[in-house]
Amino acid sequence: MNDNSRNHWENVYETKTPDEVSWTQEKPEVSLDLIRSFGLGKEARIIDIGGGDSNLVDFLLEEEYENITVLDISSKALEKAKERLGEKADQVTWIHSDITMFEPPETYDIWHDRAAFHFLTQEEQISKYVSTAGKWVTGFMILGTFSKDGPKKCSGLDIQQYDEAALSEKFRSDFTKIKCFTQDHTTPFGTVQNFVFCSFKKI
């Protein structure tokens, strides 16, 4: 695991509340709508990449999905999510890992990533991510990244901006695009970030 990345994110989650980080959403409507759109049953294996203490997992549990995995580079982020969920946390598989080092224990019907992929700025990291998703996703993938009109940095780190064409190109050997669209995300402190979301189906 990249110690610099891990230390950065542990510090973020040690020192900031959800209201102090830009990616917080009260309800992740876009992600939920896309997950529902695939029409899979409640037993679908779903993994949230970089899920941290995002509350997507809360809503998936509320909708009675049974096989949810949350992966994050920060153990503190996962601890916060577990504390928030209480006993419900036992229904979730929690994985503390850098996505570029991740060796999945199973395949996934839905791979969801909002705002993790764009932190990978080196070709080697991106290639590892693409090959892992290509190998272990059997159904669908949702990716949300900063668009070409979005920020160039986040949490003090450089990010990689994408548009529909660039995201589709990265994953074209294993996935076919279903749809892409842009959306403005208003942060807890009132700034606006433009995201591009794409949904893909495994070839």
Image (cartoon, helix red, strand yellow):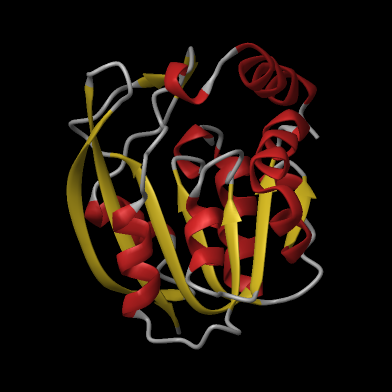
Image spot of residue 197 (x, y percent): 29, 54
Would residue 31 be found to the left or right of residue 121 on screen?
Answer: left
Count of numbered circles in the view: 0
Q: Is residue 112 above or below residue 152?
A: below
Left or right: where 25 falls relative to 196: right
Outermost residue, front direction?
Answer: 87
**In terms of image quadrants, where is residue 148?**
top left
Q: Could you tell whether 54 is left or right of 98 in the image? A: left
Compared with 142, 197 (above or below) is: above
Q: Position of residue 35 (x, y in %)?
A: 40, 70
At x 54%, y 83%, the residue is: 42
- Residue visible at 55% across and 58% down in the picture: 130
156 on left or right of 128: left
Quadrant containing the N terminus in the rendered view: top right
Quadrant of res 161 = top left
* Horizontal and vertical percent position of residue 177: 30, 72
Q: Position of residue 156 (x, y in %)?
A: 48, 12
Residue at 43% from the left image edge and 21% from the top image edge: 19
Query: Relative to 36, is 117 above or below?
Result: above
Q: Is residue 176 above or below residue 20?
A: below
* Residue at 72 percent of width and 32 percent of height: 74
Q: Quadrant of the C terminus?
A: bottom left
